Image (spheres, rainbow, N blue to C red):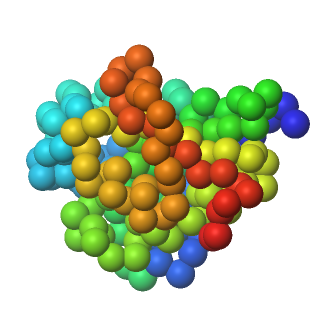
Amino acid sequence: MTEFDSQPFLRGTKVELRPLQSSDRAALFDVAADPLIWVQHPEPDRYQKAVFDRFFDDSISSGGALLIKDRKSGAVIGSSRYHGFNANSSEIEIGWTFLARSHWGGAVNGELKQLMLDHAFRQVANVLFYIDACNLRSQKAVKKIGAKRADGVDAQGRCIFIIQRSEYIG
């Protein structure tokens, strides 16, 4: 396999994901403009328009960004991304995920990650998550879906978590 389908359309009972488009900027910024989303994030000022615009432009150019919508209301509630497909080691990263606080603490993040993991494991054996050491909320969230912390940290000081297809319960 030489390619990974990094912008699929995915649909669950609570959320649907589709490729992020340039026309989504304003709706996604409406979600990202909440400073409390970014408190434990390494870029805590991402709620500011100029900082968000850099993030959004990077998301678009990544070729792996997905818009997250609430299925019930149709509202934009966040985004996530596939990144760094490596055919040789059969792995892909899931990251850059953020959700509106109205969707924290329930089943939305679990379903979102399950949809992304189910899709990824059709094509790779390992899914990685790189999470800032200070972002305890995200570390807790990936542990909740079965990720295990790998030894060490990456060059940016982020903790590395992994889920292997062979251990994935789904």
Residue 15 x %, y %: 48, 71
In the picture shown, does residue 103 fall above or below 157? Answer: below
User: Where the N terminus falls, by quadrant?
Assistant: top right
Tell me where residue 137 sits by quadrant: bottom left
From this view, report whether residue 103 is shown above or below residue 100: below
Tell whether 30 sits left or right of 114: left
Q: Residue at x 79, y 27 (%)?
A: 88
Residue at the image position 67 percent from the left and 33 percent from the top = 85
**Residue at x-position 41% and y-position 27%:** 153
Q: How many marks?
A: 0
Looking at the picture, how far across and down is residue 74, in whole percent? 41, 73
Residue extending farthest right:
1
> In this rendering, does residue 17 appear at all?
yes
**Residue placed furthest toward the front:** 151
The quadrant in which residue 38 appears is: top left
Position in image of residue 61 (x %, y %): 52, 27
* Residue at 33%, 51% in the rendered image: 138
Residue 63 vs 135, above or below: the answer is: above
Left or right relative to 56: residue 129: right
Residue 75, image x, y percentages = 36, 68
Q: In the rendered view, does 22 fall on the left or right side of 55?
A: right
Residue 20 showing in the rendered view? no
